[in-house]
Amino acid sequence: MPSIVALIPARSGSKGVPHKNIKPLGGHALIEWSIAACKAASSISRIIASTDSADYAQVFLGMGAEVPFLRPAEIAGDRSTDFDFIRHALDWLLQNDVEPDFLVHIRPTTPFRDPAIIDLAVAEFINHSQATSLRSVHPMPESAYKTFEIALGGQLKCVASESTELDAANNPRQQFPSTYIANGYVDVLSTRFIRNKHLIHGNHVLPFITPMILEVDTYDDFSMLEWQLQNCPELGTRLFN
C-alpha cells in the first residue's frame, strides 16, 4: 500500500481573522474539523500540521495531529507559497523520517468535509496514472465568462478580453462554458512529481468535483458556517460523536 500523509498548513499570522486556525466553530477549533476528517479517512496513515507557532503545535498535538517540526518564519508569511511549506515538510521527512508516496493537502479554512470524499479523491488520483495531481473544485454559480474587469479607460470589459462590448455577457448562462473554482476540500499530490519537477500541481491536474462549500476568510464567513451548522447538524456529528 502506498504511504499517504495528510499535510495541514496552519501558520499563526492570519490578518483577516487573527488566530483564525484556532478560532472556535461549533465548539471546536477551526483546524480541529480538518484533523477530525483526516482521522476518519481510511486512506490517510499520518496527519502532520505545518505551523510556525510552538503554542499552536501543543494545541494540534492534543487534537491528534503530529507536529514533528516548526515551519521557519521566512516561509510562514503572507507572501509564502504552498510550494514553500510543502517542500519544507518533504525535506524534513526525507532527512528525519520517511517521505510518503503521496500528500493530501488539507486546508483548515475548508472545515466541512466528508471523510469518505477524501478517500474517494485519493483513490481516483492513485488510479489515474497520467495525472500530475488532483485538485478539488466546485462549479461556479455563474460562468466566469460572464464576469468583468475594469479597462484602463475606467469602463467595464469582458474578463480576459479587451472587449468593452458587454451585451453578449447578458446571454443565458447555458450559452457559456461551465467554469469551476478551487475550494480547498482535498488536493492530492505526488511526492515523486514534486521532487522531479519542483512543482505542486503540474500540467495534468485531475479535477475532483465536490459539493459547493464555503471557505473561511472573514468573520462573516464564520457566521455563515455557524448558520450552516445549525441547519445541518450532521456536518458535525459525522466527525464529532
Image (tube, rainbow, N blue to C red):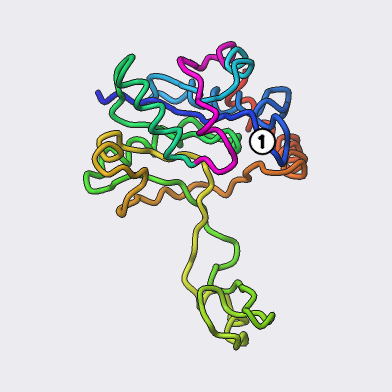
> Up-down: is 88 above or below 146?
above
| Drawn side of residue 86 relative to residue 194, left or right | right
- The residue drawn where x is 22% and y is 44% is 129
Which kind of residue does numbered mark 1 sit on? Answer: Ser
Is residue 216 a member of the stretch shown in magenta? no
Element type at mark 1: loop
Q: Which of the 4 quarters of the picture holds residue 63?
A: top right
Q: Quadrant of the C terminus?
A: top right
| Drawn side of residue 220 relative to residue 83, left or right | right
**Looking at the image, which is closer to me, 226 or 132?**
132
Q: Which contiguous range is marked in magenta?
A: 60-80
- The residue drawn where x is 73% and y is 33% is 18
**Looking at the image, which is closer to me, 126 or 107?**
107
Q: Which residue is mark 1?
A: 14
Q: Position of residue 83 (x, y in %)?
A: 42, 40
Q: Quadrant of the N terminus?
A: top left
Q: Position of residue 93 (x, y in %)?
A: 35, 20
